[in-house]
Image: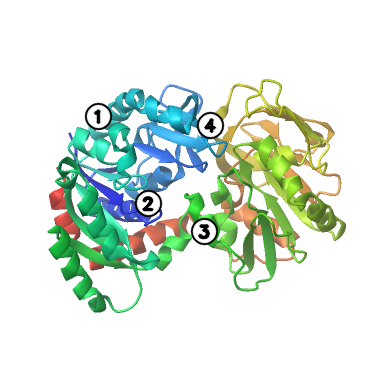
Amino acid sequence: MAKAIMLQGTGSDVGKTVLVAGLCRVARKRGLKVRPFKPQNMSNNAAVADIPGETGGGEIGRAQWLQAIACGVAPSIHMNPVLLKPQTDIGAQVIVQGKVFGEARARDYQTLKGRLIHAVMDSWDRLGADADLIVVEGAGSPAEINLRSRDIANMGFATRADVPVVLVGDIDRGGVIAAVAGTHLILPEEDRRMIVGYLINKFRGDVSLFDDGIAAMGRFTGWPCFGVVPWLKAAALLPSEDSVTLERLASGEKRALKVAVPLLGRIANFDDLDPLRAEPQVEVVFVPPGRPLPADAGLVVIPGSKSTIGDLVEFRNNGWDRDLIAHRRRGGHVVGICGGYQMLGRVVRDPHGIEGSVTEAEGLGLLEVETVMEPEKTVRNVSARSVHFDVPLSGYEIHLGATLGPDCQRPAVIIDGVHDGATSADGKVFGTYLHGLFGADLFRARFLETLGIRGSGIDYRAEVERALDEIAAHLEQYLDCDAIFAAAR
C-alpha cells in the first residue's frame, strides 16, 4: 500500500487544492508514482474520467483532474469517489465512483455518509495499489466538529485510513494564529494526534515578520511548522474549481475585448472560461446578480448550469434577458455552453421533474431550438471538430437532455462524427454541449479574430504545466517538503 499524507484546512478556500497539486508535482519530479485523492468534494465544476471497459466516463471534481495532470497520470474516478453537485440551497446530486447515486437534502446526506464510506475506502484501496505516495485533500475544515460523527471528508477518513495530516492556515484572510490554535483546542484527542504539523499559505511580504507568530502557534499547539508559502501568482493560471473564487473574479484592467459571464446561481464548469482569461487582450467579467450585463461587452458567454430551468428563471429575474437582447441589437456575439446552450433556445422542458417542481420554462429565444430533459446523463470525453473554423477540438460532455430544432442544421461542432449544437442565421450566436471549447488554442485564436482580436498564440495546456512547475519550485523553496513526505505513512 502506498504511503499517504493529507492536507486539511482551518477553513474553506485556504488553498488546499493548489498545494496538493504542487506537492504532487514535487513528488513526481522526485521520481515517485504519486496520486491525488479527495474522499468527498462539493463542486459543480466536474471533469470526466474514463472508465476502463466502458464507452462513457465518470464524473470527478475538476480539482482532482488538475491534480492528476500534476502527477502526470490520467484522471481516475477513484481519485474523488464522492462528488456532491449542488442543485438547490439545501440539496445536491450525489455522484459515487463517477456515477449518479441519487439526490439528497443536506440533512439526509449526513445519514447517507455511513453507506458512502465503503465506496471511499474501496477507491482508496484501489488507488493505493499502484502508487508510491498519495496526497489527500480534505474538504472544509476538521474544526467543524458538529459534523464529526459522520465525517468522511476530513478526520473521519484520516483516522479510519490512518493518514497523517498537515493543517493549512490561510494568513491572507486574517486570524490565522487563532485558526490554527483554535483547531488544536477544539479537536478531540483522537483527531488531534493525527496532525503532524502545519503550514501557512498565501503570505504577502517579509516572511521573517511572522517568526513571532510561528513561535506563538508552537506554544499553543506543540506542532512543528513545515513552512510559510508566499502568495503563488502562478495559481491564477490554473483551472478554477471552487465557486468561492467567483466572488473575486470581478472586472479588472481594461482590455481590448470584454467578455461578460452572468454569474448563475448553479453555475457549472466555469473553468471553460479560463483559457479566455489567460488571453492578454481579453477581460472576462463575471457579472453577479443584481448588476446588468455590461453594455461595452463584445461577447456574452452563458456557461453551464446544474439547474438549467432554475437558472433560466433567475436569469430573467435579474433582467439579464433584456440586457442580452440589447447586446444582440448592438451586434454583440453570444455563446452558450451546455446549460447555457439550452437556455438560448425557445423552451426547456423537464417532463420527469428531474431538476425540480418547475417542469417548463421559456428560453431566451436566440436560437431556434428546444430542449427536453432526459433521465440518462451523458458523461464522456470526446474528440471534436469546429464546423465554423474546421479545426480540431477536444473536451468532454456532462449533461442531461436533448436539443433539437431548425438551427441545429447549422451545428457548432462535430463530436465523434455527430453534429452538435446550433448556430443562428447571422452566425453571431451559437451553442454547444462541448466543454473545453476555448481550451483549443487554434479555435480560440480563430474565434477571437472574428471579434477583432488578435490571439496571443499561447499554448494554454503548456501554460498550465508551466504554472504547476513554478508552484512546485516555490513549494520546494518555502516548505520543508522532505519533512512532509517523511511524515507520510
Give amino acid for label 1.
Answer: Asp
Q: Position of residue 336 (x, y in %)?
A: 70, 45
Q: Earlier in the sequence, mark 1 or mark 4?
A: 1
Mark 3: which amino acid?
Asp
Relative to the observer, which residue lies in front, 36 or 38?
38
Taking 328 as reference, is 14 left or right? left
- Number of the label disc, if any, that sits on residue 125: 1
How far is the residue under mark 2 from the one under mark 1?
22 Å
Q: Is residue 336 above or below residue 288?
A: above
Secondary structure beneath dot 2 equals: helix
- Depicted 391 relative to depicted 96: above or below: below
Which residue matches tag 4? Answer: 380
Q: Position of residue 379 (x, y in %)?
A: 54, 30
Q: Secondary structure at mark 1?
A: helix
Instruction: Point out which mark residue 17 bears.
Output: 2
Going from the N terminus, do you reach mark 4 or mark 2 first? 2
Q: Is residue 26 visible?
A: no
> Does label 4 or label 3 sit earlier along the sequence?
4
Under circle 4, the secondary element is strand
Image x and y of residue 426, in percent: 85, 49
* Real-space CA distance between mark 2 and mark 3, rounded to the nearest whole angstrom: 23 Å
| Residue occupied by mark 3 | 459
Marks 1 and 2: in contact by CB < 8 Å?
no
> Nearer the viewer's eye, disc 4 or disc 2?
2
Task: Quote the CA–CA distance across marks 3 and 1.
Answer: 36 Å
